[in-house]
Image (spheres, grey):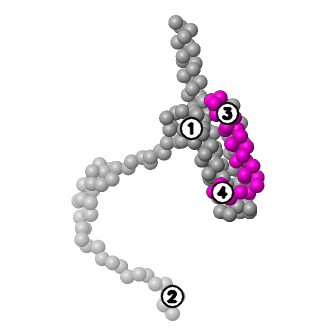
Amino acid sequence: MLLSACVAAGAAAQASDSLSVARRVVAATSLAAKEYAVGVPPGGRRVFAPAEVEEAKQFLDGARADVGGLPSAVRATADSGLVALRALIERVAPPDSVAERAATLVQRIAAAAGGGGRLTPSRCAPPRWPVGRRSTRSSAGSVMARRGGAMGPRRGTWRARRPRVSPTARR
């Protein structure tokens, strides 16, 4: 009984580990396609930013190093797909074809690894800053109370000033 519980826990840990490896491979593959698109014009054949293309190659090499941690059902497909992507980059292919091949590979890895669509990194929403009247009162309430409200005691007395012109500009 205890042995079966340990085996089940180990299998669950391995599944979550392979899911994290799949996430890394997917992220690296997607980033490689994006970096490549920055360094090569839409028609391909030339490299505008060699550093970006080199970075794309490094992302693919890193993803290829992680292929061993993927589920066995997708290892060969992922490895051959990464090799094909690297060959496209070496040939200086158009970025659209590289992005298309990368998207296909990402879909295959996601389908084989499972994860219920959680392979792509979730977008982190920026912190929601309090907006509006309630936040103004809470954050600056004491200052406003001392000055006589939001506009202060001199409310409505603002006048536009004439722009200053330097003496040399008048000539």
| x then y, percent, for residue 57 | 72, 48
Q: Earlier in the sequence, mark 1 or mark 4?
A: 4
* Numbered disc in front, either 2 or 3: 3
* Distance of label 1 from label 3 (alpha carbons): 12 Å
- Vertical placement of residue 92 versus 77, above or below: below
* Distance of label 1 from label 4 (alpha carbons): 22 Å
Residue name at image x 54 percent, y 41 percent:
120
Q: Main secondary structure of the magenta part?
A: helix
Q: Between 28 and 137, which is closer to the camera in this rendering?
A: 28
Label 4, on which residue?
Answer: 95
| x then y, percent, for residue 58 | 71, 46
- Vertical placement of residue 158 versus 90, above or below: below
Label 2, on which residue?
Answer: 169
In the image, is residue 101 part of the stretch drawn in magenta?
A: no
Residue name at image x 41 percent, y 81 percent:
163
Specify the amino acid type for callout 4: Pro
In the image, is residue 95 part of the stretch drawn in magenta?
A: yes
Q: Earlier in the sequence, mark 4 or mark 3?
A: 3
Label 1, on which residue?
Answer: 110
Residue name at image x 63 percent, y 57 percent:
96
* Distance of label 2 from label 3 (alpha carbons): 72 Å
Specify the amino acid type for callout 3: Arg
Q: Tell me which segment is drawn in magenta.
A: 69-97
Q: Between 87 and 23, which is closer to the camera in this rendering?
A: 87
Label 3, on which residue?
Answer: 75
Please tell me how crowded label 2 is: few (under 14), some (14-19), or many (20+) other residues with Cα within 10 Å.
few
Marks 4 and 1: in contact by CB < 8 Å?
no
